[in-house]
Amino acid sequence: MIWWFAWIILILWIFAVPYNIPGQRKPKNSSLDILQRRFASGSISKEEFENSRQILLRDIV
């Protein structure tokens, strides 16, 4: 009887837990992170990056 209970708990844990594991790294999708990725990939220039960064930082504060 205990083994059935353990198997049920294990199966529920496998399907329910992976969505919100504490401490799990999640991809950053803030606007500043997206801007940094665009600059790193070369899709925007340094001037565009600095201007956009200043606008974003001004909005945060």
Image (cartoon, rainbow, N blue to C red):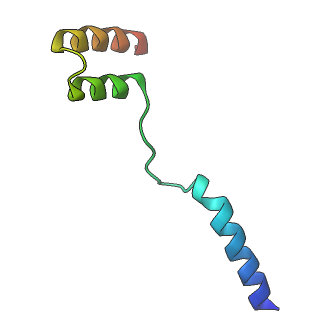
Establish if 58 lies above or below 3: above
Q: Is residue 47 left or right of residue 8?
A: left
Establish if 7 lies above or below 45: below
Establish if 32 lies above or below 15: above
**Front one among 45 and 56:** 45
The image position of residue 26, as x and y in percent, is 45, 45
Q: Is residue 2 left or right of residue 51?
A: right
Name the residue at 43% across, 27% down: 30
Name the residue at 25% across, 20% down: 43
The image position of residue 57, as x and y in percent, is 34, 14
**Front one among 51 and 45:** 45
Q: Quadrant of residue 52?
A: top left
Q: Residue furthest front?
A: 43
Q: Residue furthest left?
A: 46
Q: Quadrant of the N terminus?
A: bottom right
Q: Is residue 38 left or right of residue 30?
A: left
Establish if 36 lies above or below 61: below
The image position of residue 60, as x and y in percent, is 41, 15
Q: How many dots with numbers?
A: 0
Q: Quadrant of the C terminus?
A: top left
The image position of residue 38, as x and y in percent, is 29, 24
Name the residue at 34% across, 8% down: 55
